Image (cartoon, rainbow, N blue to C red):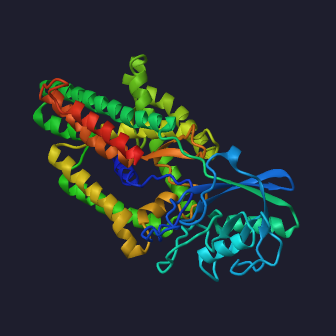
Amino acid sequence: METLWQVLALLLLLLLLLPAVSFAGDISQEDDRAPKIPGCSNYFLLVKVQTWVNGKEDREFVGVTARFGKMVESKEKHANQTRLSLANPSDGCTKSKNKIAGDVLLVHRGGCKFTTKAKVAEVSGASAILIVNDKRELYKMVCDNNETDVDIDIPAVMLSQDAGASLEDTLSHNASVAVQLYSPDRPLVDAAEVFLWLMAVGTILCASYWSQWSAGEASIEHDKLLKDVSDDALDTESAGVSGIVDINITSAILFVVIASGFLILLYKFMSYWFVELLVVLFCIGGVEGLQTCLVALLSRWFKHAGESFIKVPFFGAVSYLALAIFPFCTAFAVLWSVYRHLHFAWIGQDILGIALMITVLQIVRVPNLKVGTVLLSCAFLYDIFWVFVSTSLFHESVMIVVARGDGSGDDGVPMLLKIPRMFDPWGGYSVVGFGDILLPGLLVAFSLRYDRAAKKNLRAGYFLWAMLAYGFGKLIGEQV
């Protein structure tokens, strides 16, 4: 069982470096450097486009405002329901042949500048303009460099290709479509982020004390073996029962190199079936982690079952308590994988993830500060390269593409903790990747083991300050 865990731990450490980001909408970053000029200096804001078909509330789409034009209302109660009309011609570059006084005009991208479309719509009497992108993502509409003074007094909103096609299809069936445009403000801090912070800090805290406790238990067992067996027997037996994976400098560097290769593999071959494979690997690790944590907790009450072993092929000696718990852990992981698309499935994912990370932090250890510094420095360079530098090589950020799960349908990588935003009008989840917990957790857990070995108290040691630094850094990171 311990040999299996060593293999799983190294495999899962590769998976933990997968990114975790949350998007309320996918927005192209191409125009971030566009200059701001008078009349063209708005902030880009996501917009809710609520629709009504023949008087009945229908789908809601997400758009993004332009640099130019009037800003949309921030409160739903102040936003009006307005009839939607299709431009004729569809590109909206010339005055529409249809009567559109007071309507919201739906036009296609292309044929002329964004500002031209908006100005033509305003002159035609439209109250707002929805411009349909020619791609599935959103696009930030800006002004050209040679435009000096833009004066547009109606809102301009970009919609994705899918949203535009849906609205056009409805209008083509002679249905009456009305839309409501508003951009609700997000709360400064959502309660979900507080709970996510507590989960991240609590995971490292529990794992650190468990790691320190197990190191102490191993030291006691080692002393007993010194008294009872010869040195030769000790060398033979202790090598097989340690169950601990120590990271050295070479493995720390290779670890990030191999993780980079794995990230490219995901980038090139990301698909529904690839994500399903990651789900299987996550479930295997989650079962092992949940079982290990439950055995450690329940062995206090069922000491005899925890200390009685039976030999199982391939797994070796397994306690009766572990055998009794294994079916429950397996059933829990299987149920989560089957129903992971339900709105409450995040609870099961977080339970499996926390148990997995606590167990990995107890098994995989940093032996000294030098190795910890090399590992975290390499991980820092890994993030910088694959988020920013990779855009010059692949024409897009590899890390962000993988994090979004492009090509995987609605699924994303499961190696993250998530919790639904409670008071955010945009909904979605607050998430944190395993790497943001496990990598600093290795160093924090080492600091506690070092403090206990050096007989330092909490204030004089390194653990308290390392824990405070991680908590403070995580708090700042969530607000950026």
- Residue with the most extreme top position: 301
In the image, residue 256 sits, relative to residue 149, either above or below, namely above
Do we see residue 308 in this rendering? no
**Residue 235, position as x, y percentages in the image:** 16, 39
317 lies left or right of 423: left
**Residue 277, position as x, y percentages in the image:** 52, 56
Q: Which of 135 and 359 is in front in this view?
A: 135
Do we see residue 211 in this rendering? yes
Q: Nearer the viewer, residue 425 or 270?
A: 425
Total count of labels = 0
Residue that appears at 64% across and 45% down: 75
**Residue 323, position as x, y percentages in the image:** 47, 31
Residue that appears at 47% across and 58% down: 403
Quadrant (top left, top right, bottom left, bottom right) of the N terminus: top left
Q: Nearer the viewer, residue 156 or 300?
A: 156
Residue 424 sits in quarter: top right
